[in-house]
Image: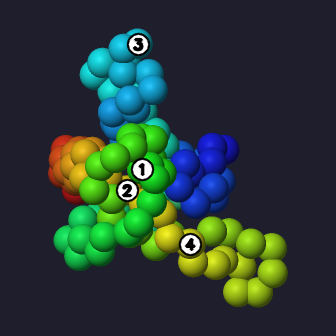
Amino acid sequence: MADCELCGAARPTLCPVKVRDESVILAYPKGTWRGINEECLDRCHEANINRVPIKAKKCDLCGTRNVPLFQVTVQIPVFQEPYHRNSNKAICESCFEACEDTIKRRIAEKEESPHH
Ligand SMILES: [Zn+2]
Ligand SMILES: [Zn+2]
């Protein structure tokens, strides 16, 4: 099991998103992988379409500061009814693009699968 980097929900597998983490960009100039679950990936995709600006200091996925940030509402799992609560995350444009890349890759993988 692994925890989603956005909502913290544990899943057997996560969707890898390649982000540019400024704090380690010298060590990983091509980007670093962040794991988020399918629900958060879908919400990032929706947020990328709607583009609601949010005031925040840094991107919640890559940690980049001083860039335009957009609101992504994710569901944080909790142990009481209704077992989740909404939480607003701030995501930057480059992470949105990274999410779109992950979505495209997943669609391509599904189409290549012999089960289809
Ligand atoms: Zn999540
Ligand atoms: Zn980011």
> Residue beneath label 2, please?
91
Q: Residue at x 64, y 78 (%)?
A: 85
Query: Is residue 116 found left or right of 9 in the rendered image?
Result: left
> Residue beneath label 3, please?
27
> Residue beneath label 4, please?
87
Cα separation between marks 2 and 1: 5 Å
Distance from mark 1 CB to nearest ligand 2 atom below 8 Å = yes
Q: Residue at x 50, y 70 (%)?
A: 88
Indicate the amino acid at tag 2: Ile
Q: Earlier in the sequence, mark 1 or mark 3?
A: 3
Badge 2 vs badge 1, beta-carbon distance below 8 Å:
yes
Query: Is residue 11 found left or right of 69 in the rendered image?
Result: right
Query: Is residue 91 found left or right of 84 in the rendered image?
Result: left
Q: Earlier in the sequence, mark 3 or mark 2?
A: 3
Q: Residue at x 38, y 69 (%)?
A: 54
Cα separation between marks 3 and 2: 22 Å
Task: Give the number of the disc on residue 59.
Answer: 1
Residue 105 horizontal/vertical position (percent): 23, 45
Q: For the view shown, which residue lies furthest in the bottom direction?
A: 81
Q: Is residue 25 above or below residue 66?
A: above
Q: Nearer the viewer, mark 1 or mark 4?
A: 1
Question: In what element is the residue under mark 2?
Answer: strand
Cα separation between marks 1 and 3: 19 Å
Cα separation between marks 1 and 4: 14 Å
Res. 20 in view? yes
| Quadrant in which residue 7 is drawn | bottom right
Distance from mark 2 CB to nearest ligand 2 atom below 8 Å = yes
Q: Which quadrant would the N terminus be assigned to in this image?
A: top right
Question: In what element is the residue under mark 3?
Answer: loop
